[in-house]
Amino acid sequence: MTMNEKIISSGLGDAVKVICFDSIDSTSSYLRRALDEGEQGTVLAVADRQTAGRGRSGKSFYSPDACGVYMSLLIHPGIGFESASCVTAKVCVAVCRAIESATGIAADIKWVNDLYLNGRKVCGILCEAINDYKNAVTESIIIGIGINVSTVDFPEELREIAGSLGAQNITREELAVQITKALLNISFGSLTEEELAFYRERSCVLGKTINYFINGQKNTAEAVGIDSSGGLVVKKNDGEILTLTSGEISVRLC
């Protein structure tokens, strides 16, 4: 069943423009096009299906019809670059909390931008900053979120790593509303002690041996901490301590 635009709009009020699609290439790509065409408001784009859902580092996000929440939110925080470095961590915390509040399901956070349940990925998050480099300001951010709510059939390459919330007590419209409200309530700036504590508590990589990839080269280390900016602190086999920032680095549990 197609998601109901009126239900989502009524849950969010007039401050957010809501647009629902039966099918679209990508909700984030749509909002980027809208921004390029002069959109200045706060806009939520939601789709029943994406034909070219986008993940991190150019990867795709599997977005089958009517069994997930595929949404992107365009906001205009006008924050400095230092504050922008914490956005993904803040969004992970906000989405994790919103899912738990709405469904009772407590997901884990896999650095840097995924939520996991029972060892399987159920949510991907992609934050895209639109920067004014002259003034060192992030003018706008597109927050893309894909959640497997009731997805059962995954492509072969995803069957061992992807899962679903399996939430039965909430509609996809309600979930989209609750997550959007949580995102709109984010106070941009440094991570608060409360956010850091939550992130660390829910991390599914801390204390684990991980592989991390820089420019395609695999390295192995132990994940030992999350720093105040959301960076992953790792201890290499030779004892060296290194802090990973998002960039082009990917992390995999061993």
Image: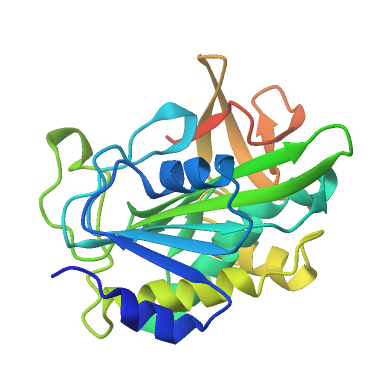
> From where the camera sits, is residue 112 visible?
no
Q: Position of residue 139 (x, y in %)?
A: 74, 48
Side of 126 where 175 appears, left or right: left
The quadrant where residue 66 appears: bottom left
- Residue appearing at x 18%, y 68% in the figure: 2
Residue at 24% x, 70% y is: 3
Q: Quadrant of the N terminus?
A: bottom left
Q: Residue furthest left?
A: 153
- In this picture, residue 4 sits left or right of residue 39: left
The foreground one among 203 and 221 is 203
Quarter where residue 214 is shown: top right
Closer to us: 46 or 37: 37
- Residue at 43 percent across and 28 percent down: it is 58
Considering every residue shown, the one lying at the far right of the view is 135
What is the total number of numbered labels drawn onto the structure image? 0
Q: Position of residue 177 (x, y in %)?
A: 43, 77
Residue furthest to the front in view is 37
Image: 133 above or below 110: above
Nearest the eye: 61 or 51: 51
**Rendered image quadrant of residue 30:** top left
Reply above or below: 174 against 42.
below
Looking at the rendered image, the quarter that the C terminus falls into is: top left
Q: Is residue 231 left or right of residue 18?
A: right
Percent x, y of residue 89: 63, 55
Q: Is residue 237 above or below residue 35?
A: above
Q: Nearer the viewer, residue 232 or 81?
A: 81
x 14%, y 39%: residue: 155
Q: How is the image coloured?
A: rainbow
Figure check: 31 above or below 242: below
